[in-house]
Amino acid sequence: MIDIRNLTIKKARKHLDDKDFSARQLAEAYLEEISKVNTDLNAYLEVYKDVLEQADVADKKIAKGEISPLTGIPLAIKDNILISGKHASAGSKILKGYIATYDATVIKKLKDEGVVFIGRTNMDEFAMGSSTENSAFGPTKNPLDKTRVTGGSSGGSVATVKMNGALFALGSDTGGSVRQPASFCGVVGLKPTYGSVSRYGLMAMGSSLDVIGPITKTVTDAEIVFNSIKGKDEFDSTSQNEEGINNKKTPKVIGVPYHILEGGGMSKEALNSFKESIQKLEGLGYEIRDIKLPNIGYSLAVYYVIMPAEVSSNLARFDGVKYGLHIDGKDLLDDYLKTRGEGFGKEVRRRILIGTYVLSAGYHDAYYNKAITLRQKITDEFIKMFEEVDVIVTPTTPGPAFKIGEIVNDPLAMYLEDIFTVPANISGIPAMSVPAGTVEVDGVSLPLGLQIMAPHNCENLLFEVGKKFLGE
Ligand code: GLN
C-alpha cells in the first residue's frame, strides 16, 4: 500500500528511484482514490483512459536511468491548458467537442520528463471567477468541507491535490486563480513572474496578466515544478530568458503594507491569524517593516478594467466557426449571436460587455487609458519598495472558503476576493500562497493563506521564505 496521503514529489522521486514502487503502482493508487472521491467533489472533469500506459512509459525511462525530477509523477491539468489529442473545454459549453491539436509548451516540457497526466480539472468558465461555481459543469466542492467552495478559478486543480487525486497540478493565474484556491484548501500555490513560464497553449484570458503556476503540497515541490516548466519559448514572445531568473540573495527584510488590510474586508479572526503569521516570521529572524504602497488600493479597479478589455478581445475567436459549439442561425451574424449567447455563461458575457465598453471610442480614455497609467504607477511603487525590503507579505484572501451559493449572485462581493492577489498580476511580480493558520467556522477548521511577493524573477526568495515559514 502506498501512503499517498503523506507523499510529496520529493518523496515519491526517491521511492520511484529506489524501486520501492513503480510509476504504474503509483498511478494505480491515485486512480483508486479518485474513483472513491471524485464523483462527489467534481474536481476532475475527465480522467484519461491512458494513465497506466503513460505510467508504463515512465517506468521504462526509470529502468533505463533516464530520470528527470518529474518522471513518473502523477499530475492534474487545468481544463484550459492544451494537451494534443485531448479534449479541453475551459469549463465552458462553447468548447463542446473541441480536441486540442497541439501541446502547450508546459505540457511538452512535462511530457519530455515522463510525467503521468491523470486528467483535466474543473474551473470557472475561461478562468473567470473565484469559486469554480462559474463552471458549466457544476462547482467543485472543497475537500475540507463539502458545503464550501474550493475557490477559483483553478478550484478543480487545487482540489485534486488536496483530495490526493494527484501529486501536483497546474493552474493558471490571471488575478489570483492559483493562490486564492490554494489558500482555501490549505496547499501551496505559486504565481510565477509574468513571462517566466510560456503561455503557449494556455487559453488566453487576459494576455498581459496570465501565467501558469504549480499547485503542490510543499514549497519544495512548487520549486521543483517551477524549475521544470519555466524558460523562454520561441512560441511566446512575452516569455523571457532564464538568465534573469533567480537572483541570489538571502532575504532578511519583510515589508507588510498594513494600510491595505483596512479596506480588505477581513474578519477579526482572519486578521489575528495574519498577525500571528507575522510574529512567526519575526521569530524566524526576519525584520518586519510597516510599508506604504500608496496606489495599491486601486489595483482591483485597474484589474477589472484591463482584464475584461483583454477578455473581450481574446474571446472574440469563439465564433461558432473555428472551435467547438456551433448553433445555426438565419445568417452568419445570427450564427455568432446564437452560438455565443448560448455557449458562454453569464459571467463571461458580463466581462465581454464590460471589456467592449471600456475599449469603445467614447470611453477608452476615461477607463482603459487611466487603468494603464495606474498599472504603471503600481508597478513602479513595487519596484521602488523592493529596494528597501526583500519580500512583501499580505494575507492571500480576506477570509476562508465561503459556502457554495453564498456570493455567487453578487459579482462585486466575488471580485473583492481578489483584493490581495491582483497587485502581483498587474505588476508581473511573482507571488506564492502558503498555508498559514486556520479559523473555526461553524465547528469546522478552515485554512487561510499567507501571500509572499518578491521582485520580478526572484522566485528563489519566495521559496526560501516559504520553506522557512513552513519548516521544510
Ligand atoms: N478571480 C479572478 C477573476 O475572476 C481571477 C481569475 C484568474 O486568476 N483567472 O478574474
Image: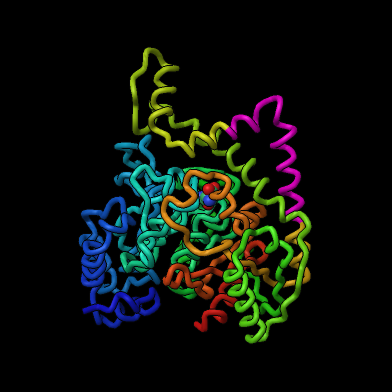
Give, as a single range, the part of the protein colored magenta.
354-380
| Percent coordinates x, y for residue 148 in the rendering | 41, 59
The residue under the point 57% across, 52% down is 175
Q: In the visual, does 299 lie left or right of 105?
A: right
Tell me which colouring the rendered structure shows. Answer: rainbow
Q: 264 or 86: nearer the eye? A: 264
Q: In the visual, does 59 lie left or right of 415?
A: left
The residue under the point 36% across, 65% down is 143
Q: In the visual, does 76 lie left or right of 353?
A: left
| Percent coordinates x, y for residue 138 in the rendering | 35, 47
Q: In the visual, does 413 lie left or right of 115?
A: right
Q: Is residue 376 magenta?
A: yes
Q: Is residue 219 above or below residue 409?
A: below
Q: 264 or 364: nearer the eye? A: 264
The residue under the point 67% across, 46% down is 301
Q: Is residue 468 above or below residue 385?
A: below
Q: 131 or 360: nearer the eye? A: 131
